[in-house]
Image: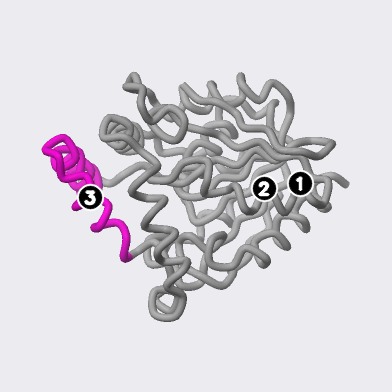
Amino acid sequence: MITIIKGFGTGTPIVFLPPFPFDSRFWQPIAVELNKQGIATQLVEYAGSGIFKDRVPKPYSLKQLAESVVSEVGQQAHFAGLSMGGYVAFHIARYFPKYAKSFIFMATHPFADSPEQKENRDRLIKQVKEGRKHFVLKAYFPSMLAQETYLTNPEITSKVWNLMTSSYSTDGLTTALESMKNREDLSGHLSEIDQPTTVIFGKDDSIISNTEWAEQIPNARVFITNGGHLFPMEHPAETIKHILNHIEWAEK
């Protein structure tokens, strides 16, 4: 269901879980910089995306995806997930906590889709199956970055679009959308997360508006950073600083 791409470094690895609709390349620039500082990294590749793009994925739940991740990692790790990657990390925290040394939740939340959101995902799934993949991705595109980034940084804007349109197959997109649509509401289990947890939101994120849930995690630190939903692409140096600070704190 997934594969792990290992980077260089020593010690407890950071496992990076990509957002939808991106493959492991989303985290690669961050991981490379961390590797240069001796931090071990592992990048997750979901079924139907990246190197699995040419294979038809079997339907999966996010719990199954989380189980596959911890099985492939095979040791205790720091788990960092953004958006859909965060959903997977929440399932690791709920069902497989012994594998987690700590968590970094970025631009995400623990709630299930509302009925309206489920209807929207069904509409998107139908459009993808009808061959309108690029139309669906264009609907996501305007909310990926801060408005300032769209206006002033065409290089990042172009890179985001190229990654979005090349990361997933048609079957991969519909399978991932189905898994997110049917995910559990894990907001009632936040108080059970006892690992060191860093939660990071982009100040110009137009997708994630509810940030109060983070206060329910006992051992959590919350940061607001520059950028939008994909702030690690917009502000990688700032993101790396947050990650390094988290690792130093979590390893104490």
Check residue 75 for magenta coloring: no
Which residue, given by chain and number where applicable, does mark 2 sit on? 31
- Residue sitting at x 41%, y 66%: 157
Q: Is residue 36 left or right of residue 5?
A: right
Tell me, for residue 134, which label it has, or none. Answer: 3
- Residue sitting at x 31%, y 34%: 169
Q: CA distance from mark 1 to mark 2?
A: 6 Å
- Residue sitting at x 56%, y 43%: 190
Q: Which SS does the magenta portion mostly show?
A: helix
Which residue, given by chain and number where applicable, does mark 1 sit on? 35
Relative to 101, residue 199 above or below? below
- Residue sitting at x 25%, y 57%: 138
Q: Amino acid at mark 3?
A: His
**Circle 1 SS class:** helix
In contact (CB < 8 Å): disc 1 and disc 2: yes
Q: Which residues are magenta?
A: 116-142
Q: CA distance from mark 2 to mark 3?
A: 28 Å
- Decide which of tag 2 and tag 3 comes sooner along the chain: 2
